[in-house]
Every structure is written in C-alpha cells, then in structure tokens.
Amino acid sequence: MDQPGIERRPVKMINGITREFGEVFFDGARVPARDMVGEPGEGWRIVMTVLSHEREPQELGNAGRYRTTVERLTDMARARGRLVLGLPAA
C-alpha cells in the first residue's frame, strides 16, 4: 500500500471521523506475480465478491438470527445449570 502508484485518501464521515473509511486509487501500481490474488483480469470480480459480504442487506437478518441462536443457547445453559467459560451460567 506504500508503493508508487497507490494513493489513499480518507473519507470524512458526517461525525468527523476519517480513520474508518477511505478511497484507494491505483495508477500504475505493480504487483509481483507471487502476490496476485486470482488471475489477470479478475480483480473487479474478486473485489465485488469481497465487498458484497460487507454490504449485503441480509447481514442485518443474519445478526438477528445469530442473536436468537445465542439467546437459545443461553437459555439451555441456564436450564441445565451448565458452566459457561468456567463460570456458572447466569
């Protein structure tokens, strides 16, 4: 990320924070073949696949399902008097 041909710019959010997000511009940056991910010409597809996991609306639904699963496991542990992380379930 520090080589010539890569420019990073922070994106200032409405709350003034600039460390969380940023833009990255590639202009003539070179990558050794051993460091390539995927095949030549697949970069856009790979990036969009990675970003889709961060931006999918379904993630909100997954968070709800995870919470439900954790609540059920907690209830089961309490009902059975099991230890959680070495402590009595409470």
Image (cartoon, rainbow, N blue to C red):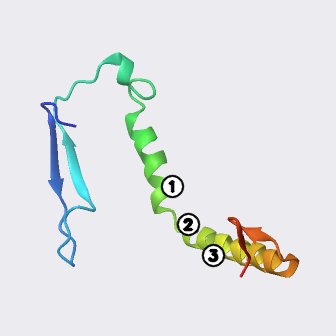
Q: Which mark is residue 59?
A: 2
Q: Are marks 1 and 2 in contact (CB under 8 Å)?
A: yes
3D distance between C-alphas at marks 2 and 3: 9 Å
Q: Name the residue under label 1.
A: 53
| Above or below: residue 90 compared with residue 17 | below
Viewer-proximal residue among 65 and 78 = 78
Viewer-proximal residue among 54 and 1 = 1
Rendering coords of residue 75 (x, y %): 79, 80
- The residue located at (48%, 46%) in the rendering is 49
Rendering coords of residue 83 (x, y %): 76, 69
- The residue located at (22%, 24%) in the rendering is 30
Q: Tag 2: Cα neighbours inside 10 Å, few (<14), some, or many (≥20)?
A: few
Q: Which of marks 1 and 3 is nearer the N terminus?
A: 1
Q: How many labels does the image show?
A: 3
| Left or right of residue 11: residue 42 | right
Q: Tag 1: Cα neighbours inside 10 Å, few (<14), some, or many (≥20)?
A: few
Viewer-proximal residue among 84 and 34 = 84
- For the residue marked with disc 2, what is the amino acid? Glu
3D distance between C-alphas at marks 1 and 3: 16 Å
Q: Tag 3: Cα neighbours inside 10 Å, few (<14), some, or many (≥20)?
A: few
Q: Name the residue under label 3.
A: 64
- For the residue marked with disc 3, what is the amino acid? Gly
Q: In which quarter of the image is the C terminus?
A: bottom right
- The residue located at (74%, 77%) in the rendering is 89
